[in-house]
Image (cartoon, rainbow, N blue to C red):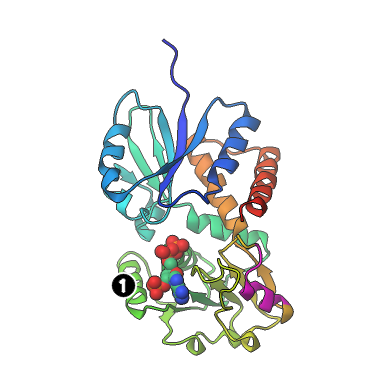
Amino acid sequence: MSTPKPIYGIIGFPLEHSLSPVMHNTAFKELGVDAEYKLFPLQEEELGDFFADLREKDSPIFGLNVTVPYKEAVIKYLDVLSPFAQKVNAVNTIVISPERKLTGFNTDGPGFLTHLIELGFQTGGKRVAILGAGGTTRAIVAVLCLLPERPASIKIYNRTRENLGQLLGDLGKRLDVSIVQPADSIDDLDIAMANLLINTTSVGLKANDPGLVDENLLHKGLLVYDVIYNPAETRLLKMAKKKGAKTSNGLGMLFYQGILALQHWSEAELDEDVKMIMRENLQKASLEKK
Ligand code: ATR
């Protein structure tokens, strides 16, 4: 009997806009690996059965990504958590061994950091302002707080103050968040004094969404990083460009979290040529998905 083709994939809901299949199926093709990356759109009540099936000896699934809204919910189904995933308390990558042991990682934080380094931004002593307090902020704050070159401050504003309080309370149990300060308003973010402004909210996904902050707060000394990559340039990024700030969308973060996930599954460094083709295909697909 021939062994079935290894399957990888992403669980979350909804998933139709996910660019992960393009990236990983490109990698399998370029590496000459006979494997496939699939979408697993799951309802919450289906998670238990899905994870029970993963334990079966004949399951063809050897690796998963996890996205909204299950990055915390999957933790209870795993055997081992990487030290960083423990700190973040959220998992976006699962490795399933041939013995069906499940290990959870978080590559969102390192993915963001790798892109930040690529952009030439040095974190040590810098002032960071963040809009939003969801799962992405959780990973970004954790990675910034754990750096040897920590920022001087991280100020966060969120529409719902209570969600921000919960996030900081939970992260504070796991790591030193003394550089993080909740802001009561956008004014309290002190954007005029900041070096890095990050938007992790979903505001900007729609063409007529507002820019979130007053344009006059944006300035030349700022890198404005919007984790949204479709549209490639949100209103916030357009305003930032106009004001002479450096800008980036989140496609680089998506790319690097995917590269790091693939490296966990294959336990190998990826060839630079393969990475380049993955990035090109990701870029193309992000422009096609409107
Ligand atoms: P992700 O994993 O991408 O961070 P998430 O965990 O669902 O996604 O978080 C979404 C973030 O966008 C939250 O900070 C949310 O704010 P609330 O805590 O107030 O819900 C923010 N957000 C979503 N829609 C928003 C809007 N219209 N205005 C401001 N913030 C918004």
Let me know if residue 132 appears in the view: no
Is the residue 155 above or below the residue 39 in the image?
Answer: below
- For ligand 1, which image quadrant applies? bottom left
Q: Quadrant of residue 199?
A: bottom right
The amino acid type of the residue labelled 1 equals Gln
Q: Quadrant of residue 54?
A: top left
Number of marks:
1
Residue 157 x/y as whole percent: 45, 80
Is the residue 204 above or below the residue 29 in the image?
Answer: below
Does 148 sit left or right of 138 as displayed? right
Bounds of the magenta span? 232-241
Check disc 1: other Cα within 10 Å, few if <14, some if 14-19, many if 20+: few
Q: Quadrant of the C terminus?
A: bottom right
Overall secondary structure of the magenta section: helix
Residue shown at the point (65%, 89%) measured from the top left: 216
Residue 69 x/y as whole percent: 37, 56
Residue 267 x/y as whole percent: 50, 36
Residue shown at the point (40%, 49%) measured from the top left: 12
Residue carrying label 1: 166
Is the residue 147 above or below the residue 106 in the image?
Answer: below
